[in-house]
Image: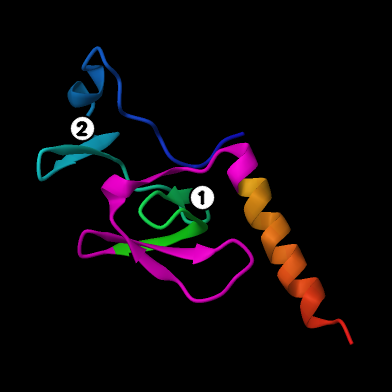
Amino acid sequence: MNSGIERGGDPAGTAAAEPERCHRLRDVLVPAQPVVGAVLLDTATERVGTFEGAQGGRWYLRPVGGGTEWEADPSRVRPAGTMEHVRALVVEENRTRSAYRL
């Protein structure tokens, strides 16, 4: 499954030779900006969201099913795994269904 983000943390150091794939931010290797809609995990908050954009060195994520976006530190964000993505979809489905119960 393509998460829409390129991985640059290669132990051989070849990622540093490819500046279009990653860049340095305060001496921390940060992946290049993902495509809009990529499903990511914000490890600081343990929230899964879709990438909405970037501004001022911060990334903006929105919950998978919609809702209020939040700011995330790019160094604390990684592509969501399949199970994390499915968990976020189930949480959203349960939230939607409970809204229609009598």
Q: Which residue appears farthest toward the right when viewing the image? A: 102
Q: Which residue appears farthest toward the top when viewing the image? A: 12
What residue sits 61% from the left and 47% below the top? 85
Q: Which residue is mark 2?
A: 19
Residue 57 occupies quadrant: bottom left
What residue sits 29% from the left and 51% below the top? 74
Amino acid type at circle 2 is Pro
46 to 23, vertically: above or below:
below
Q: Is residue 32 left or right of residue 38?
A: left
Residue 88: mark: none
Q: Is residue 75 left or right of residue 98?
A: left
What residue sits 28% from the left and 55% below the top? 73
- Magenta stretch contains residue 93: no
Secondary structure, mark 2, is loop
Q: Image quadrant for the C terminus?
A: bottom right
Residue closest to the eye, 63 or 33? 63
Q: Nearer the viewer, mark 2 or mark 1?
A: 1
Secondary structure, mark 1, is loop
Amino acid type at circle 1 is Ala
Q: Which residues are magenta?
A: 55-84
Residue 45 occupies quadrant: bottom left
Locate residue 26, reporting x and y percent.
10, 45
46 to 60, vertically: above or below:
above
41 to 69, vertically: above or below:
above
Q: Is residue 98 left or right of residue 28?
A: right
Q: Residues within 10 Å of mark 2 (few under 14, many from 20)?
A: few
Q: Earlier in the sequence, mark 2 or mark 1?
A: 2
Locate residue 88, reporting x and y percent.
63, 55
Q: Which residue appears farthest toward the front when viewing the image? A: 102
Q: How many marks?
A: 2
Q: Which residue is mark 1?
A: 38
